[in-house]
Image (tube, rainbow, N blue to C red):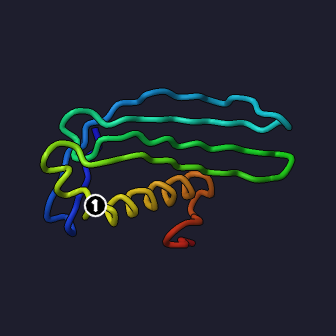
Amino acid sequence: VTFAGALGGFMWVLNPCRQVYSVSDMRQRGGGVLTQVAYATLEGHLIEGEERLSVSMQPSEKTVTLTLRSVSRGSGRAGKLLFPFMGGMQRRFFLDQVECLSKGVLGAKCWGPKNCT
């Protein structure tokens, strides 16, 4: 379950979800390593869908690639009514994920939507 604030913290929403699968440290061609996790929404979530987060490291190229894929639509009457207006919240949610992961990888510094230092 995720707990999300909306409308500047005026409204809070519980978002039930579950992990669908995870792959940890799968070896790739060229010595790279791939880690993935995917989760899907459950009944009671305003959005119906699935999200997958993949992190691939290529030591030979000294690169780390983050891929975030999401497929979603409104769920239930309220979700279907509100879904066209949720794009901004979803975008912020994804950017916050990228920022948090960047901070975790780079320590106190981060690369991402807010370009922290």
Mark 1 — residue? Answer: 86
Residue 61 shown left or right of residue 19 in the figure: right
Q: Position of residue 50 (x, y in %)?
A: 40, 39
In what quadrant of the picture does the C terminus appear? bottom right
Q: Position of residue 110 (x, y in %)?
A: 57, 64
As rendered, which of 85 and 68 lies closer to the eye? 85
Q: How many marks?
A: 1
Residue displayed at 13% across by 47% down? 77
Residue displayed at 19% across by 58% down? 82
User: In the picture, residue 34 is in which quadrant?
Assistant: top right
Q: Position of residue 60 (x, y in %)?
A: 86, 47
Q: The residue tagged with tag 1: helix, strand or loop? A: loop
User: In the picture, residue 102 is in which quadrant?
Assistant: bottom right
Residue displayed at 31% across by 48% down? 73
Residue 61 shown left or right of residue 21 in the figure: right
Mark 1 nearby-residue class (10 Å; few <14, some 14–19, many ≥20): some
Residue displayed at 62% across by 36% down? 35
In what quadrant of the picture does the N terminus appear? top left
Q: Position of residue 94 (x, y in %)?
A: 44, 57
Q: Amino acid at mark 1?
A: Met
